[in-house]
Image (cartoon, rainbow, N blue to C red):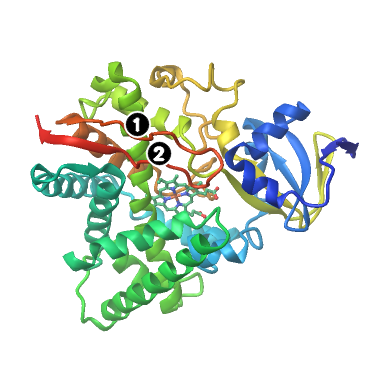
Amino acid sequence: MKKSNNITREKGLDHSITLLSEGYQFIPKRTARYGTDLFQTRLLGQKVICMSGQEAAKMFYDKERFQRDGAAPKRIQKTLFGENGIQTMDGSPHEHRKQLFMSLMTDSRLQRLGELTKHYWEQRAAKWKKKDKIVLFNEAQEVLCQAACEWAGVPIKKADIPQRAADFSNMVDAFGAVGPRHWRGRKARARAEKWIRQVIKQIRSGKLKADEESAAYAMAFHKDLEGKPLNISMAAIELINVLRPIVAIATYITFGALALHKHPELHDEVKDYNEDRTQMFIQEVRRYYPFGPFLGARVRRSFIWNQCHFNEGQLVLLDIYGTNHDSRLWKEPYTFTPKRFKDWNGGLFDLIPQGGDYYKNHRCPGEWATIEAMKVSLNFLHQLNYKVPKQNLNYSMVRMPTLPKSKFIMTNVELK
Ligand code: HEM
């Protein structure tokens, strides 16, 4: 470890392999080891600043200092994001595109997503009686895929649901991967984009009638700041930026089920859909369990912060997992305590599983949709009797994204 410009610099040629072998712990381990919120390392052949905590998060969202253009590696764009989508945009074109996503998140539209999610859980549950066991994660993905498509105005044949759900899931599963998992993600994206491009074309030609309030309609007819429609590929990428993450909520539902299993005394927290305690339980699932490990941005122009030099063009990573477990923000961060949210002031930079700051910035526009789908789904679990047989419920802190190994197997499942 060397210090210069007041920044702690990690020795060594490159730490990309260490990042892959330490996963979610890579940044938190080093901030703890060096006793700092900020250190410099080398990843993929470049000097990268890693930072953690509330103050760092505030700084990370300063648009004068940081830009997203050039931050996401192509391998992430070719799997998770889609190439040149909203995640890579800056300035007023970003704000304009963001408005498109935010316009989909009205109260009535969110309620509709909740109703559809509930409906498809009930439909699926009717078939569980005949089954020896169900795997919650797989069921959740297909329920959410059906709900997401219908909500977004994308027709989907029943027989295609397993493949489409797997494709959305494999795009997410590829983000921390090299090798076969990465290639599976690319193949999944190619297939999904081809499908959704057809949907956009049909809506534009009038062959397919889409509800004017739907995401598919919005993407098909959105105009950029110059008044030009999105090209078909971009419209498809942005529509997938709605569908894919809705399916990804299956991860939080699975972790929610795990939390209920580990803390049976908390089962009643999700009993009443509209109660604050359900909301608090869900916030704690999003804080406690790992999903996105960190975010990346590039320095727009050189500046000094806390006596450390940030050089133009440099890549900077903000630690999501570490900030959500920062003991300065969260008392006993490694215990699962929904009640902690009773006194939470709704900070914009402390609970950051889906990013920080206001929605005008890059914060996830799907946060309310995520909370809504989790509420409905965990409330639905509460309405079931089920057994949790012996299985491996451990989750890796190295694999990104992670999940309980068994994906949460349930037996003797029936409605109460
Ligand atoms: C499984 C739950 C979800 C997680 C963990 C998650 C996480 C995130 C994170 C960490 C970001 C990056 C924020 C940043 O760059 O500052 C993000 C952005 C985004 N999310 Fe989500 N998200 C989830 C659900 C959703 C849903 C349900 C939707 C849409 C319905 C959605 C759509 C997006 C979009 C479009 C962006 C890009 C925003 C921008 O760059 O301005 N996400 N999400």
Q: Tell me which residue sits at (68%, 32%) in the image.
A: 29
Which residue position is annotated with label 2? 404
- Give x and y (percent) for residue 120: 16, 50
- Give x and y (percent) for residue 350: 55, 31
Pick the front one: 41 or 295: 41
* Residue 231 falls left or right of residue 29: left
For residue 238, the mark is: none
* Residue 232 falls left or right of residue 360: left
Q: Is residue 386 visible?
A: yes
Q: Are marks 2 and 1 in contact (CB under 8 Å)?
A: yes
* Location of residue 148 with respect to 307 vertically, above or below: below
Q: Tell me which residue sits at (61%, 59%) in the image.
A: 72
Query: Which of the marked residues, 2 or 1, is nearer the chain's N terminus?
Result: 1
Q: The disc labelled 2 sits on which kind of residue?
A: Pro
Which residue position is annotated with label 1? 258
Q: The disc labelled 1 sits on which kind of residue?
A: Leu
* Location of residue 17 with respect to 414 vertically, above or below: below
- Give x and y (percent) for residue 362: 53, 50
Which image quadrant: the N terminus?
top right
Q: Quadrant of residue 57?
A: top right
Gap in angstroms between the C-alphas marked 2 and 1: 8 Å
